[in-house]
């Protein structure tokens, strides 16, 4: 009881004496010299009855350097001197007066750790300390509490104040510097590439989250309507049903040029838009006139259905494209503003961005507008990272900016320090543009203004609001088939196959017939297409190709054909490859003027068994009879 009483009634002087003695004794232990503050924590708590969590001391010790502790101590002195009696009344058993006793500029790190530990003892203590901080640092403490980490550029953007000095170069020997004010935050610097990362360690962050109120964007917040000046894409749900059949046909015809990496070739987009008449988000803006085509081309490039998976039902096609997100589609390939995609190694990529996109589609409120500002902040708070490649591969990517000297451009590689703005945020925005292109979300947007990589970071930066619509909710399993009716005029999509001829009839407003049938038939009027032997065999070079084409036609164009069409296909197959190429025969030409040799070929008993006559004074000799044929001619006086 006396020992407990002594612990309860220890003065600041006694607490300071106790911790200084423990630190002094611990300093002689070379193994723990760098972690003395943490190593003596158990002894201190046992001797004083202090209830601070040991992990708090450990987090401070392991994540703050001496410069950072000095910055904390400066602000703590003000708070301690203004609230001494109040602090005493809390009976925290922490040596906070140590901050006034020591010379903070020369004190050993262990003493600095214990002098500032009180900051993280109780929420009300932290709040008083917070009040002593300059406003930019207050914002940084609070914003960083609700995100896992932030690069210097990201944190600067969040608080509206620069957190690091800008260097003219970040090459070797010229490391970045944290601004003096923000050394009070835990941070790490990678000197070789100039990256600064701020992050609260686990236990300090848990403590701060119990101190600060949840931020504005902790929850997904809906708005009634986006601002009127923004453009809107709200007809996508209808448009995709008008286009999906011709998009599928275009893909199955191999019309989309795809690089070996799986990325659509840059020259494929204009052709696709012109050929299919793809409706665009910003059709009259030359810079951004291919955004929707880009999204559609890339998702289609990733879609490679087997013959037994081809479906002509538009809704089923969209459901299959949804499955493509899980396995084959790469969001990285939407970021066409960046260069060097082919250098990015995706072999060990865990499909993190695609999984995050699916998670977003499961979190968005149905039929409610949400701002991009809210979504990006929410993503940071809840650690919904949009990493379209392994972060270690970001440095393979590059961006180009115009040079101040001459007309050429300068190319810069992405680093982990700027990857959020150049890669991860654009990956999120481009994903929502893809969802809009497929008719699964509605969006409100504008064209980015200024110069790319100076005023904005990607072609998708104009996105401002997103709304999950009925089709998107159905595609992602958030409503049943009974709750969804496709917004499509089936009459304008139907093809009628004549049972007496090889004619195909369609509505004059059918938007997809031309594209779907172009590989099989010729248009003869606004409402009729005609199939002939020539039109159907146009690109077939073998019986196997013909079989594949017939199967594709029956699966993707006409699953229920009249009997006369099957007879037509049977006839085509019966005539395929009737003539065989004989590879093991040699043709010899006899001069038409050499009547003696012609007569000899017809009369010699041995030559007649070795050669067969053909038109045009030619004879055919089997490869395995060639030597005998030549030998017999030599016997008769003819040298070959």
Image (cartoon, helix red, strand yellow):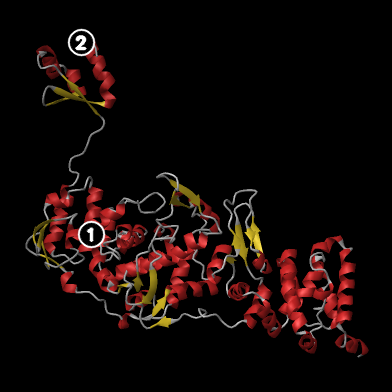
Q: Toward the viewer: 389 or 169? A: 169
Q: Residues within 10 Å of mark 2 (few under 14, many from 20)?
A: few
Q: Regarding mark 2 in the picture, which secondary structure is present there?
A: loop
Mark number for residue 276? 1
Q: Toward the viewer: 8 or 493? A: 8
Q: In which quadrant will I find the N terminus? A: bottom right
**Position of residue 607 in the picture relative to residue 109 (left or right):** left
Residue 502 higher or lower than 630, as above or below: below
Where does the image place residue 68, in percent across and percent down from the top left? 71, 66
Residue 112 higher or lower than 369, as above or below: above
Q: Quadrant of residue 517?
A: bottom left
Which residue occupies the extreme top position in the image?
A: 637
Say if mark 2 contacts mark 1, CB within 8 Å. Answer: no
Q: Nearer the viewer, mark 2 or mark 1?
A: 1
Q: How far apart are labels 2 and 1 at the CA level? A: 71 Å
Q: Regarding mark 1 in the picture, which secondary structure is present there?
A: helix
Question: Which residue position holds label 2?
Answer: 636
Residue 636 higher or lower than 188, as above or below: above
Which residue occupies the extreme right position in the image?
A: 2
> Which circle's residue, 2 or 1, is located before the other in the chain?
1
Q: Quadrant of residue 438?
A: bottom left
**Position of residue 368 in the picture relative to residue 630 (left or right):** right
Q: Quadrant of residue 102?
A: bottom right
Mark number for residue 259? none
The residue at the point 71 percent across, 78 percent down is: 120
Where does the image place residue 611, in percent across and percent down from the top left? 19, 23
Q: Is residue 54 visible?
A: no
Q: Toward the viewer: 640 or 351? A: 351
Q: Toward the viewer: 25 or 99? A: 99
């Amino acid at each position: 009881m006396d020992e407990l009483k002594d612990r309860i009634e220890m003065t600041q002087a006694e607490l300071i004496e106790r911790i200084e003695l423990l630190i002094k004794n611990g300093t002689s232990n070379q193994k723990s010299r760098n972690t003395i503050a943490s190593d003596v924590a158990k002894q201190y708590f046992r001797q004083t009855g202090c209830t601070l969590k040991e992990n708090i001391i450990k987090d401070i010790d392991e994540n703050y350097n001496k410069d950072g502790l000095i910055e904390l101590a400066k602000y703590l002195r003000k708070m301690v001197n203004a609230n001494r009696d109040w602090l005493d009344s809390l009976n925290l058993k922490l040596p906070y007066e140590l901050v006034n006793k020591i010379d903070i500029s020369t004190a050993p790190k262990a003493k600095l750790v214990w002098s500032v530990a009180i900051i993280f003892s109780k929420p009300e203590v932290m709040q008083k300390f917070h009040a002593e901080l300059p406003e930019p640092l207050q914002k940084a403490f609070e914003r960083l509490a609700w995100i896992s980490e932030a690069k210097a550029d990201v944190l600067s953007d969040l608080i509206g104040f620069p957190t690091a000095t800008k260097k003219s170069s970040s090459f070797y020997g010229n490391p970045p510097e944290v601004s003096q004010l923000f050394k009070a935050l835990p941070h790490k610097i990678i000197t070789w590439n100039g990256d600064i990362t701020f992050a609260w360690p686990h236990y300090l962050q848990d403590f701060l989250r119990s101190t600060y109120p949840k931020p504005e964007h902790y929850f997904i917040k809906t708005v009634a309507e986006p601002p009127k000046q923004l453009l809107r894409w709200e007809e996508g749900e209808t448009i995709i049903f008008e286009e999906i059949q011709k998009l599928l046909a275009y893909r199955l015809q191999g019309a989309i040029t795809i690089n070996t990496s799986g990325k659509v070739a840059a020259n494929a987009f204009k052709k696709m838009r012109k050929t299919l008449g793809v409706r665009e988000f910003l059709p009259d803006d030359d810079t951004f006139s291919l955004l929707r085509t880009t999204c559609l081309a890339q998702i289609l490039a990733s879609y490679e259905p087997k013959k037994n998976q081809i479906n002509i039902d538009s809704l089923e096609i969209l459901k299959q494209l949804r499955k493509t997100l899980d396995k084959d589609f790469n969001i990285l390939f939407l970021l066409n503003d960046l260069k060097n995609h082919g250098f990015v190694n995706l072999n060990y990529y865990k499909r993190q961005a695609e999984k995050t996109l699916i998670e977003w589609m499961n979190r968005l409120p149905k039929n409610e507008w949400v701002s991009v500002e809210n979504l990006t902040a929410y993503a940071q708070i809840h650690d919904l990272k949009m990493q379209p490649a392994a972060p270690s591969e970001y440095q393979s990517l590059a961006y180009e900016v115009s040079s101040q000297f001459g007309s050429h451009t300068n190319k810069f590689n992405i680093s982990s320090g700027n990857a959020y703005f150049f890669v991860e945020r654009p990956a999120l925005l481009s994903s929502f543009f893809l969802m809009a292109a497929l008719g699964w979300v509605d969006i409100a947007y504008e064209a980015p203004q200024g110069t790319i990589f100076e005023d904005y970071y990607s072609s998708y930066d104009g996105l401002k609001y997103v709304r999950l619509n009925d089709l998107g909710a159905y595609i992602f399993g958030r409503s049943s088939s009974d709750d969804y009716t496709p917004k499509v005029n089936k009459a304008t999509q139907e093809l009628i196959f004549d049972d007496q001829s090889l004619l195909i009839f369609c509505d004059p407003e059918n938007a997809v017939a031309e594209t779907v049938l172009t590989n099989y038939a010729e248009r003869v009027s606004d409402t009729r297409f005609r199939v002939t032997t020539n039109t159907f065999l146009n690109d077939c070079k073998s019986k196997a190709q013909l079989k594949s084409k017939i199967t594709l036609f029956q699966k993707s164009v006409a699953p229920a054909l009249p009997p006369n069409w099957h007879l037509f296909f049977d006839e085509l197959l019966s005539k395929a490859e009737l003539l065989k190429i004989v590879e093991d025969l040699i043709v010899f030409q006899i001069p038409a003027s050499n009547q003696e040799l012609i007569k000899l070929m017809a009369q010699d008993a041995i030559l007649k068994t070795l050669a067969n006559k053909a038109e045009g004074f030619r004879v055919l000799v089997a490869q395995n009879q060639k030597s005998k044929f030549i030998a017999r001619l030599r016997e008769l006086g003819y040298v070959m």
